[in-house]
Image: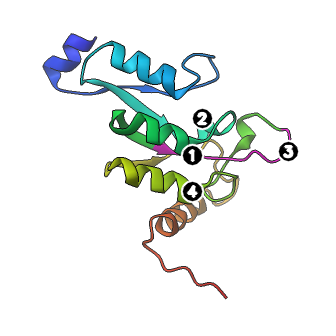
Amino acid sequence: MLPEAEKLDVSMNIENIFFNGYLMSPFEMIDFVDGFQCEHLNVHFDTGNIMEYQFPEHWISMLGTRIRNIYLKEYSLKGTDHSLEAFRPLLDGTTNWPAVLNAFETTGDNGYLTFEYFHPFAHFPEALIYLTSDSLDRMLGKKAINRR
């Protein structure tokens, strides 16, 4: 597939998914991606997938420019529920967002940020869009925070 990606000038991005028990450390991900010696093989980085086992800010600084696209996904380490229910709306979990965003800034990443969420609200699901937009504005410094 890599020769086709090169021909089309597109990036194939490997996502950090831990549920399969493969590429469980940033070192393994780096070795895997770099082992192909191809600029068209990179990383699709998901902040929430890492949170059950490790911290995204550590991976980001190590993976650096290998990261080509980003999912901001919230995860909660509270309690013992390690299911899909542990994924939460942005800012409603235990992710250290200032550290994550600082790590991205340190790597020089200016790419797109996308959000992934599994459980829309049962009633008025569009509210999640507004909640996510507001959370992203606050995280990225686009909205002033009123502290009383």
88 displayed left or right of 23: right
Marks 2 and 4, the one that precedes in the sequence: 2
Percent x, y of residue 95:
64, 51
Local secondary structure at mark 1:
loop
Q: Is residue 116 magenta?
A: no
* Mark 3 residue type: Gly
User: Which residue does the image show at 80% across and 48% down from the upper left?
Assistant: 78
Distance (Cα) linking label 3 and label 4 = 20 Å
Q: Magenta part of the protein: which range? A: 71-80
Local secondary structure at mark 3:
loop
Residue that badge 1 annotates = 73
Percent x, y of residue 141:
45, 70
Taking the image as drawn, is residue 47 in sight? no
Question: Label 1 near label 3: C-beta < 8 Å?
Answer: no
Q: Name the chief secondary structure element in magenta.
A: loop
User: Which residue does the image show at 61% across and 24% down from the upper left?
Assistant: 18
Return the residue nearer the eye: 140 or 84. 140
Question: Label 2 near label 1: C-beta < 8 Å?
Answer: yes
User: Which residue does the image show at 51% across and 37% down from the upper left?
Assistant: 59
Percent x, y of residue 96:
61, 54
Q: Circle 2: is it few (<14), some (14-19), or many (20+) Cα within 10 Å?
A: many
* Mark 4 residue type: Trp
Residue that badge 3 annotates = 79
Q: Circle 1: is it few (<14), some (14-19), or many (20+) Cα within 10 Å?
A: many
* Mark 2 residue type: Asn
Distance (Cα) linking label 3 and label 2 = 17 Å
Residue that badge 4 annotates = 97
Q: Is residue 76 magenta?
A: yes
Distance (Cα) linking label 3 and label 1 = 18 Å
Q: Quadrant of residue 90?
A: bottom right
